[in-house]
Image (cartoon, rainbow, N blue to C red):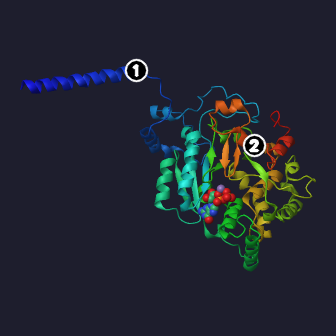
Amino acid sequence: MAGSTRIIRYVLFAFFGIMILFFILSSSSIPKPSLPDSNTITKWKGNKNKNDPSSGFAPSSSPSSEEQILVDDRPAPGSPAPTEAPTSNFTMGAIPATGKMNATFVTLARNSDLWDIADSIRQVEDRFNRNYHYDWVFLNDKEFDENFKKVTTALVSGTTHYGTIPKEHWSFPDFIDQDKAKKVREDMAERKIIYGDSVSYRHMCRFESGFFFRQPLMQNYEWYWRVEPSVKLYCDVGFDPFRVMAENKRKYSFVISLYEYAETIPTIWDSAKKFMKQHPEHIADGNSMKWLSDDEGESYNHCHFWSNFEVGNLNWLRSDAYISFFETLDQDGGFFYERWGDAPVHSIAAGLLLKKEEVQFFDDIAYWHVPFTHCPTSEQKRLENKCACNPKDNFDWKGYSCTTRWFDMMGMEKPEGY
Ligand code: GDP
Ligand code: MN
């Protein structure tokens, strides 16, 4: 009996000792950063259907509970707009500082892309979306399997949607001569042109050029951010790119630009010129022709924005001007008789149908898609935004980039000794 009393006394002593130690440690520790734990995320995700993308803005989501404050570090209403970094060419502040834009991430992927897209989602969530909870639309020419949906839904902090692309948007149109298209692929295979022998890559490029923004799941959104498998974001994105686009009246954006392989687009400029002749009403005053052509539109210099990253306006892509441009190109058959990429298609459209000021260069979004990097030149920017990229890898000022030409056309200041 005496032995068991002693044991109880020891147990009680140890218990209170641990309690006191715990109290001392927790009250003297450094305040934790506002990283939500997984329970918080789960609780928040329970509320995530509240946002209705059908309005111009989703309802203003001023945090009403403690959980939301934990994961929401957007500026409070009335707080000053972030100061402009030296090479930033956008301003913020005109639209109320809180509330989500009517926007979504969008990814085209196969089920087999799961782990590569999981990597990308994690990048985007950690650097940006954990504070914003934008939706994510996944599109596929086949049905997504349960595992793909389960894993991606667990990773995305906003609502996820999954769409299967209709056959008409992922097949040969009836005006395409199948034999001719096949011969082109065989010839391109022999010449070792990248993706030259692939049918699915051609469907993909045509879909991204003309159809992703018309899918039912995309209809209610105004803005999109395209994300591909295996990309990296190297800096915190401490602002809302959708808001920057809206406030500065931008319609399209890029982080990397370069010259396209000439062999994949021999006649794309002929089609573009035909369009310009047929539809002068759609050609914008003050467009970026100077960036696309070195001889006032006679020929194409192959400069294009790299479309594996895009933040853009869906209403622009759904406009008569863009649709009519896409249809002119599509009818000419170059998606199949050549191997036109969606990057030159989007870029030529942005270059001709938009004013040059409607295209945004996002220096602040540090990005990698094999094999090129965009890493901000400014050291101050890299330190402030916790960037993990090596500035030596930055492609902006290298020979094969078209970004120098963009800066020249825009009259934007290039860094010293670039
Ligand atoms: P690259 O970046 O030009 O080398 O091409 P990717 O292989 O990254 O393809 C571009 C995008 O289209 C990525 O988001 C891919 O996941 C997607 N994609 C490519 N081919 C297919 C396909 O056959 N089916 C589906 N559903 N997605 C595809
Ligand atoms: Mn890719």
Indicate the quadrant of ligand 2 in the picture.
bottom right
Image position of 167 with respect to 80: above or below: below
Whether residue 334 appears in this view of the structure is: yes
Residue 93 in view: no
Using the rendered view, name the quadrant where residue 166 is placed.
Answer: bottom right
The front one of 147 and 184 is 184
**Crowd class of label 1 (few under 14; some 14 to 19; many from 20; radius 10 Å):** few
Q: Which residue lies most toward the left here?
A: 1
Q: Which residue is mark 2?
A: 360
Give residue 356's position: percent from left, percent from top: 82, 45
Where's the C terminus, which quadrant? Answer: top right
Number of labels in the image equals 2
Q: Mark 1 CB in 8 Å range of ligand 1?
A: no
Q: Which mark identifies residue 27? A: 1
Left or right: where 110 falls relative to 187: left
Quarter residue 101 falls in: top right
Where is residue 4 drawn, in percent x and y? 10, 27
**The CB of the residue at mark 2 lies under 8 Å from ligand 2:** no
Choose between 371 and 329: the one closer to the eye: 371
Residue 268 image-quadrant placement: bottom right
The picture places residue 341, in percent across and down from the top left corner, at 74, 61
Residue depicted at 72% across the width and 40% down the height: 392
Amino acid on which disc 1 is placed:
Ser
